[in-house]
Amino acid sequence: MKKFLCLALVLTCFGALGYAQNARQIFDRAEKSKKPAEQIKLLNRIIEAAPDFAPAYHKRADAYKQQGKMKQAVSDYTKAVELAPKDPFKLYARALAYMEQKNYPAATNDLTKAIQLKSNYQNFYYYRLLCYMQTGSYPLARKDLEKLKTFKTGAQYLLPLEAQINFFTNNYAAARRNFEQILQRNPDNIIALFYMGRIYFNTEMYDEAISYFSKAINRDPNFDAAYRLRAAAFKEIREYDQAARDYTSLIALNQDYSYYNRRGLVYELMGDWRAAADDYSYSIAISPKWAVAYNNRGYAYLKMKEYKKAQKDFETALKLSPDLSATLVNLAGYYWTAERNKKLMYKYLESALKHNYKDVDSLYEESKKGWLFKNANNTAEFRIMTGKYAK
């Protein structure tokens, strides 16, 4: 009734302007049309005649949203909200548009206002729960979940959300029960399989994690996150060949610089320094300003006694990231291993320790950084200097 009264006022405006068709007919045409561009043209006529007619802005916003013009959609939803501030569904529509833009705090704010105006509408809580999850506000998400449980419909859709909330709040036992329930209903549910893998991975049960990640990959051979975590699990149980193969599969899906770097680290563990250096080179080619890859390649070159290449990479890494303590340690190791330059060794080593290099014990272990400082790290001078920074 309220819309019709508004339309009557618009009709008066249209009569004064001499339009042949009245506003009601034009608005009806806009609502029936399936073409957003046509809707927008019709609604423009109404808004031009009656700039305070909220439904026209709302409907035009819907059309803009269909066209993917989210900025214009949000602008029109905002105008509709300003003209009808007590209408919760206009806030709801704008919230969904904000979610399309990944502006979850703004969407949450609109949904909260909508709930204050109409507290018994299920969708308001559902979408606010999704916003809370996107921003990591899991305790608030749980409150909305419990509210949703009080509604009579839609309970079957809540179990996956409850499972994820339990997972992200580290309640792994409850999350496992939730995902097991989902898999009982649908053994091919790929998200449940993946999260089961994550639960076992996070609780250091790597064989079980690998089993679930493998099931997920069998159902979707392009599931990159499952490959990535399965590779990490294989690495943890020292099945380096398998880890390298998974990173190779990842690279085939997406030649991301970080995947080359991770595979390079696996090759290091396998003792294949040439393959590691090659992967770091691929990483650098994709992301030439990433200091970590230069540091890692420099270390591989040190292992292969290609000292000048190592020095150049360490210096490049420090230009890109002057506070990178691992590079400072490696450069100190270069000056000792390659040049026996004690002065520069101590200069860079102390700088690394001042920049919060934490693993002081590794400087004494042959299997870690100790080989870089062989015959220096058994001296009182070395122990005294590093002892000042040991915690």
Image (tube, rainbow, N blue to C red):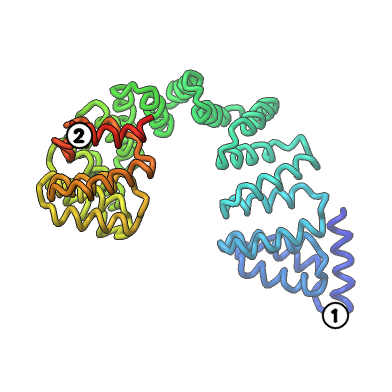
Mark 1 vs mark 2: in front: 2
Residue 114 placement (x, y as % from top left): 75, 44
Q: Residue at x 81, y 78 (%)?
A: 20
Mark 2 residue crowding within 10 angstroms, few (<14) / some (14–19) / many (20+): some
Q: Amino acid at mark 1?
A: Leu
> How far apart in space, not on screen, are marks 1 and 2 (Cα)?
92 Å
Q: Residue at x 74, y 48 (%)?
A: 89
Residue plotted at (33% across, 26% down): 209
140 on left or right of 53: left
Location of mark 1 (residue) = 17
Q: Which residue is mark 2?
A: 377
Residue that extends furthest to the bottom in the rendered view of this protein: 18
Instruction: Please provide percent x and percent y for residue 388.
Output: 35, 34
Circle 1: is it few (<14), some (14-19), or many (20+) Cα within 10 Å? few
SS for callout 1? helix
Q: In this view of the protein, can residue 242 be seen by the observer?
A: no
Residue 155 at x, y percent in the picture: 61, 27
Residue 74 appears in the figure: yes
The answer to which of 88 and 306 lies nearer the viewer is 306
**First along the sequence among labels 1 and 2:** 1
In the visual, does 366 lie left or right of 288? left
Between residue 204 and residue 155, name the one nearer to us: 204
Q: Nearer the viewer, residue 28 or 339?
A: 339
Going by the numbered disc 2, the residue's amino acid type is Asn
Q: Residue at x 89, y 78 (%)?
A: 16
Q: Position of residue 63 (x, y in %)?
A: 64, 62
Vertical comparison of 7 with 344: above or below:
below
Quadrant where the C terminus lies?
top left
